[in-house]
Image: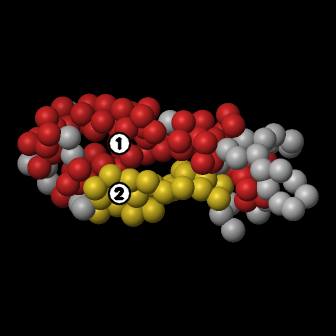
Amino acid sequence: MTTGASFGWKSSAAPDDFSKKFSNLSSSDKVAVMTTATRSGALVVQNRAKELCPVDTGNLRRSIHSEVQNATAEGVTVWVGTDVEYAPFQEFGTSRMPPHPFMRPAFDDTRAEVLSEMAAAAADLVKGL
């Protein structure tokens, strides 16, 4: 069982000031820009989740990672989370243990920063192409 969240970027959602240059890119360049930008945003969530997760041995903290799930010219999806078997019990609690949420708060806390990071990374990449 895994605990985490997926998010991404659809190529049709490119900001207006950026769209013209982005729309002129080849499909492979679009995928590269969206993948790199989305990974940059995922790192923000990943780092915040590591700050928030409960620590006993450090195994849960070390296990939090991100991975690209899908990358096409239409969009990119990245998953951020952990596959440690006890992570859902920490996140949601049990009948004997209160919840210690770390993934959802990480996503909620960083939403604006993620969008900003993705936009900045994409703009920097498009300038270089």
**Res. 5 image quadrant:** bottom right
Residue 45 in sight in this render: no
Q: Earlier in the sequence, mark 1 or mark 2?
A: 1
Q: Residue at x 35, y 57 (%)?
A: 76
Give the class, few, some or many, for how many residues have Cα within 10 Å of label 2's Cα (few <14, many ≥20). many
Determine the CA span between mark 1 and mark 2: 10 Å
Taking the image as shown, residue 67 lies to the left or right of residue 62, namely left
Q: Residue at x 37, y 38 (%)?
A: 115
The numbered disc on residue 76 is: 2
Q: Amino acid at mark 1?
A: Ala
The chosen color scheme is secondary structure
- Whether residue 66 is visible, yes or no, is yes
Q: Are marks 1 and 2 in contact (CB under 8 Å)?
A: no
Left-right relation of 103 to 73: right
Residue reaching furthest to the right? 96
Q: Nearer the viewer, residue 52 or 22?
A: 52
Give residue 84's position: percent from left, percent from top: 74, 58
- Other residues around mark 1 within 10 Å, as few (<14) / some (14–19) / many (≥20): many
For the point 48% across and 44% down, the residue is: 42
For residue 74, above or below residue 80: below
| Residue 37 disc label | 1
* Residue 125, numbered circle: none
Does 47 sit above or below residue 91? above
Which image quadrant is residue 15 in?
A: top left
The secondary structure type at the circle numbered 2 is: strand
Place of residue 33 in the rendered image (x, y in percent of width and height, measured from the top left) = 28, 46
* Amino acid at the residue labelled 2: Val
Tag count in the figure?
A: 2
